């Protein structure tokens, strides 16, 4: 069988960028069991309630839902178990320092296969207030309207 290459997206937490200010992102490996990998290869996972935590010098991913593998037997995994993140010691130490500083959290943004290995993109993030969310939406809306106006002006100019 040929070796897998490239990046294949499994799950994405789209609302995370709406709910949090993303300060820094990290790509981490995951420690998974065989049935978890098979379930991920079917493209089934949810990052919605997930969060990261540093415990005893190790990084852990909590509440990420990987459903049980349909053809699994008694060896099946539990769907929301905590999973170890594979990170370099320097990255973990840097995260510990930043997380102790103030109200920061680790949020999973995407779960994917990269060259056949399961990876998760986690972000160091600060929660947004409601008015921040409205402000961000307003900026996006203004940007879209400006782009539409520019493209309409270009179309009119070409039509002459």
Image (cartoon, helix red, strand yellow):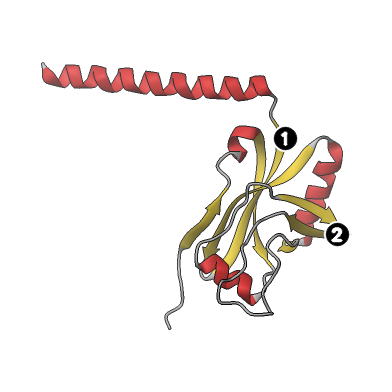
Horizontal and vertical percent position of residue 49: 68, 47
Q: How crowded is mark 2: few (under 14 residues within 10 Å), some or many (20 or more)?
A: few
Horizontal and vertical percent position of residue 17: 59, 37
Residue 82 lies, with reference to residue 36, above or below; the image says above
Instruction: Name the N-terminal-most of marks 1 and 2.
Output: 2
Residue 160 lies, with reference to residue 110, above or below; the image says above
Q: State which quadrant residue 45 falls in.
A: bottom right
Most extreme residue toward the right, as rendered? Answer: 56
Q: State which quadrant residue 89 falls in.
A: bottom right
Q: Residues under labels 1 and 2: Cα distance?
A: 22 Å
Residue at the location (32% across, 17% down)?
Answer: 149
Most extreme residue toward the left, as rendered? Answer: 160
Horizontal and vertical percent position of residue 79: 68, 63
Q: State which quadrant residue 82 falls in.
A: bottom right
- Taking 158 as reference, is 146 left or right? right
Q: Name the residue under label 2.
A: 57
Q: Quadrant of the C terminus?
A: top left
Q: Mark 1 points at which residue?
A: 126
- Taking 15 as reference, is 146 left or right? left
- Taking 103 as reference, is 36 left or right? left
The number of callouts visible is 2
Horizontal and vertical percent position of residue 143: 44, 22
Residue at the location (50% across, 62% down)?
Answer: 43
Q: Quadrant of the N terminus?
A: bottom left
- Kindly state the secondary structure of the residue where label 2 is placed: loop
Q: How crowded is mark 1: few (under 14 residues within 10 Å), some or many (20 or more)?
A: some
Residue at the location (72% across, 54% down)?
Answer: 63
- Kindly state the secondary structure of the residue where label 1 is placed: strand
């Amino acid at each position: 069988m040929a070796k897998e290459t490239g990046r294949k997206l499994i799950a994405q937490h789209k609302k995370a960028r709406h709910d949090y200010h993303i300060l820094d992102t990290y790509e981490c490996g995951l420690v998974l069991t065989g049935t978890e990998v098979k379930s991920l290869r079917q493209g089934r996972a949810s990052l919605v309630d997930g969060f990261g935590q540093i415990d005893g010098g190790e990084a852990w991913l909590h509440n990420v839902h990987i459903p049980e593998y349909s053809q699994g037997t008694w060896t099946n995994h539990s769907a929301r178990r905590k999973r170890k993140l594979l990170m370099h010691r320097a990255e973990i130490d840097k995260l510990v320092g930043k997380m102790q500083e103030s109200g920061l959290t680790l949020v999973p943004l995407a779960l994917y296969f990269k060259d056949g290995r399961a990876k998760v993109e986690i972000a160091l993030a600060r929660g947004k207030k409601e008015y921040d969310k409205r402000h961000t939406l307003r900026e996006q809306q203004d940007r879209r309207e400006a782009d539409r106006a520019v493209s309409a002006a270009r179309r009119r100019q070409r039509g002459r």
